[in-house]
Amino acid sequence: MPHTSTPRPSVGRIVHYLSHGTPARPDGSQAFPPQCRAAIVTEVDPDDPDRVGLQVFNPTGNFMRPLAAGGSSRDEGQEQGGTWHWPERV
Ligand SMILES: [Zn+2]
């Protein structure tokens, strides 16, 4: 494994969940674009360690995304809503 690889998720780690945002307008813009939300890993798919269950913490409410409902896959490129990535270093 190259030393630049990021760690695998494990239960209890804090990650970012990328919200879906609102549907794109005809010009391609969105009233509410996808946003990073805090989330805690609640379970890890043993067959695909990059697919996890999450508890997502929105500013106005929380929701669960368990593996049983499809879970969340990893997308470090942050192009796809509904995915997770490691929090950006700022
Ligand atoms: Zn993020």
Image: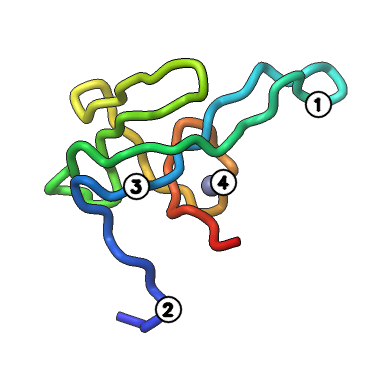
Question: Of callouts 3 and 2, which one flags the residue occurring earlier in the amino acid sequence?
Answer: 2
Q: Which residue is mark 1?
A: 29
- Looking at the image, residue 16 lies above or below residue 55: below
Q: Residues within 10 Å of mark 4 (few under 14, many from 20)?
A: some
Q: Nearer the viewer, residue 23 or 14?
A: 14
Of the image marks 1 and 2, the number of the one nearer the N terminus: 2
Q: CA distance from mark 2 to mark 4?
A: 19 Å
Classify mark 2: residues with Cα within 10 Å, few (<14), some (14-19) or many (20+): few
Q: Is residue 50 left or right of residue 38?
A: left
Please tell me which residue is depicted at 21% across the width and 37% down the height of the picture: 42
Q: Is residue 88 left or right of residue 8?
A: right
Please name the residue that numbered disc 4 is placed on.
78
Give residue 6's quadrant in the image: bottom left
Q: Which disc, if any, is residue 4? A: 2
- 48 or 3: nearer the viewer: 3
Helix, strand or loop at label 3? It is strand
Between discs 1 and 3, the one toward the N terminus: 3
Q: Which mark identifies residue 14?
A: 3
**Among the two numbered marks 2 and 4 on one chain, the one whose residue lies closer to the N terminus:** 2
Looking at the rendered structure, the kind of residue marked 2 is: Thr
Is disc 4's CB within 8 Å of ligand 1? yes
Name which of mark 1 and mark 4 comes first in the sequence: 1
Q: Could you tell me which quadrant the C terminus lies in?
A: bottom right
* Residue 16 x, y percent position in the rendering: 45, 43
